[in-house]
Amino acid sequence: MQAINDEDILQWLKTPGSQEKGFRALVAKYSERLYWHIRKMVVDHEDANDVLQNTFIKTYRGIGNFKGDSALYTWLYRIASNEGLTHLKKKQRKQTMDIDDETLHLDNRLKSSTYFEGDQVQHVLQLAIATLPEKQRVVFNLRYFENMKYDDMSEVLETSVGALKASYHHAKSKIETFVKNNVQW
Amino acid sequence: MKEKLEKDEVPFFHDKIEGKHGFTVPDGYFESLPDLLVERLRDELDIMPKKTKVVSLWSHTGLLRWAAVVALLVVIGGFYLLQKTSPASIAFANNETIVEYLLSDEVTLDEDDLAILPISDVDIELDIPEESIDALLEDVNDGELEGILQETL
């Protein structure tokens, strides 16, 4: 099936009578990528589903504000990242655990989750990522798992390329230490 | 959009996991997502009109539907005609109709039949000639007649 181009999607979304067609095309094209981006931030499938739906709802409502200064996908990633970060902040406000308890709590969630099938290294990697500050987690995930270009990441996170590179290297260093200390090699 | 990691960006455990995170997703999740989202937007914003299912009149199911409608109309029409033309739709007839029918020339009633006719609660004008009434009362004495009148009044 030929991929639908973003210009067509935007045209349909902005034209009365073809908005549903445009919206369905948008979801079909971007839902999987956005889902995995969000999932790596929030870990649980149910949370990722909520955040993803909110992302698309916000996209539809705000389509009139999209000026085309950036690519459609970087705009979508920005909305998804902000929704994910908002979700994490809300969750943190509700929980009053220290970092060790949070790690233990996540450890249990991953072990009991139906939708996590990682091996020991992948399991410990998720625990390591969870110890990072939220924005640094996003930087690491986008660079390491999605190989996103720093220029695109800069548009998504509205942060300079230099700051993002530094953030990634810090994150990588912390994660490697955590994984070395917590995996039986 | 994507670019390969620089050497110094690759963590030491990369070969072990090949960049995979280990998360999975429920079967059919992405396929069902568009319908779910469209329904949600429809309720919230009422921007997308409901999709009306267009059924062609000449499609197989369309023809069947029309046939069902016609059959129903024939049955209803038949019932209606049957009631109008048949004198014996007892279930739908009121007492007035029944009595009128029974007093018509189509039916012959004897005295016992007449006695049980529910004419007391029916407003019917019985067209009986005066001579016939005199003839009927010929064998009835005044005392009997008074008794009958007292019972009915």
Image: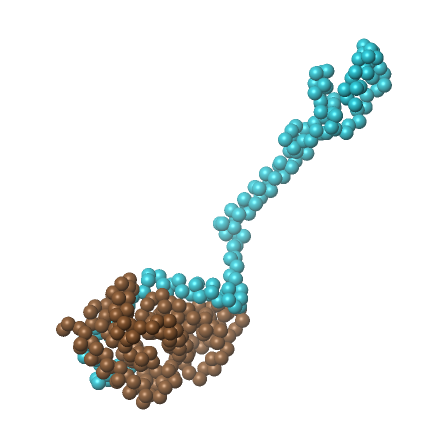
Chain colours: A brown, B cyan
> Residue placed at 47% from the left, 63% from the top?
B39
Q: Is residue A99 left or right of residue B41?
A: left
Q: Nearer the viewer, residue A174 or B109?
A: A174
Q: Nearer the viewer, residue A79 or A1?
A: A79
Q: Position of residue B46 (x, y in %)?
A: 53, 66
Image position of B110 (left or right of B25): right
Q: Can residue A148 be seen by looking at this rendering? A: no
> In the displayed structure, does residue A151 sit left or right of residue A23?
left
* Residue A33 found in image quarter: bottom left
Residue at the limit of the structure toward the bottom, as seen here: A162
Give the vertical position of B113 relative to A116 (above or below).
above
User: Which image quadrant: the C terminus of chain B?
Assistant: top right
Residue, x 52% and y 73% (percent of image)? A15
Q: Is residue A98 above or below residue B36?
A: below
Q: Relative to B79, say whether A32 is above or below.
A: below
Q: Residue at x 38, y 81 (%)?
A: A156
In the image, what residue occupies the spot 41% across and 79% down? A75
Quadrant for the N terminus of chain B, please.
Answer: bottom left
Q: Is residue B44 visible?
A: yes
Residue A141 at x, y = what percent? Answer: 30, 77
Residue A87 falls left or right of residue B43: left
Count the numbered circles shown: 0
Give the image location of residue B60, x and y in percent.
49, 49
Q: Return the x and y of residue B100 as percentages of the image width and height.
A: 73, 26
Near-viewer residue (A118 or A76)? A118
